[in-house]
Image: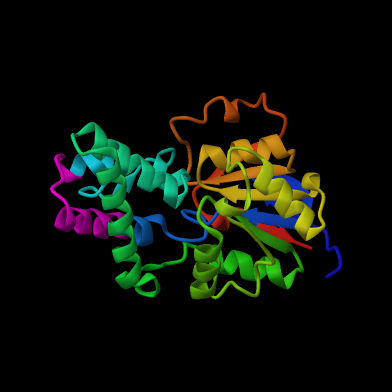
Amino acid sequence: MGRVLVTVTVHDRKYLIDAILFDKDGTLIDFASLWLAWLDALLDTLGETVAVPIQRSDLASAVGADLISRTHDAGGPLAVGSNSEVRLVLAQRLYMSGLRWEQACAAVESASRIVDTWLSEEALIDPAAGVLDFIGQARELGVRMGVVTADDQDRTLRHLHLLGLQDSIEVVIGADTVSSGKPDPEGVLLACRRLGVAPERTLLVGDTSSDMAAATAAGLATGIRLGGAGPDDELLFSGNGSIPLHRVERFEEVSITP
């Protein structure tokens, strides 16, 4: 595919770009629809397979989630960590509560495998509001697109298929394909190389400060954070960074024109 430059406008600022990179969870996929349901199922299964010496709510809190209010910390392990990192945090919390380390690790791994065999991702996955129209418009204009995610490569490819985006996203960089995940820029720069695009003609859309830090470190044209301000990104958005960053609530606040 040849290079096609388009203009992306956000907050009245224009960027000439030929590629867009996306985070997956919370950006392409509605976070709560999948990952809070997954955590619900994991903790239920864990409680059925081992005598858990800690409250369920405390385990959820350890990975940055509140399953009562159905909210999550955008900077917590569930939001920005890999699946294996989330399992490790849960195992550590169980260990600190009295289980032997090997018992804690085995219990979490076993519960995760059980959940993965029956949890219906197809029934749970909802696209983030506005994302399908946004990607459809970008594809019509010939924009190159990729995904850089903290999730595993195979699961990400499966999720893109369930969203119907497998033909729009050319490159996928999962956490298991790089040595360092976001906020390290390794995955972002690898995606640019595989797309054959210059970082300075690329933007990243994500929902966490880790996404914006990776965009900044990679020297992208800009980073766009969905969902507004986070408690941990004041320095990034101070205006003193090496690239401009933007906060938006919806994809509709970003326009793409030839």
Q: Is residue 8 visible?
A: no
Whether residue 180 sits left or right of residue 202 in the image: it is: left
- Location of the N terminus (image quadrant): bottom right
Q: Please give the name of the residue rendered at 32% of the width and 58% of the height, measured from the top-left corner.
A: 112
Span shown in magenta:
36-56
Q: Is residue 135 above or below residue 22?
A: below
Q: Nearer the viewer, residue 49 or 101?
A: 101
Q: Give the residue at x 79% y 44%.
A: 200
By secondary structure, the bulk of the magenta-drawn segment is best described as helix
Quadrant of res 240: top right
Relative to residue 209, is residue 145 depicted above or below? below
The answer to whether residue 231 is magenta is no
Q: Is residue 203 visible?
A: yes
Left or right of 166? Residue 28 is left
The vertical placement of 167 against 169, above or below, is below
Along the line of sight, the residue nearer the viewer: 251 or 91: 91
The image position of residue 16, as x and y in percent, is: 80, 51
Q: Quadrant of residue 173?
A: bottom right
Residue at the spot 85% in from the left edge and 63% down from the top edge: 3
Q: Is residue 60 left or right of residue 135?
A: left
Q: Position of residue 54 (x, y in %)?
A: 16, 39
* Residue 146 in the figure: left or right of residue 46: right
Q: The C terminus lies in which quarter of the figure? A: bottom right
- Say above or below: 45 vs 165: above
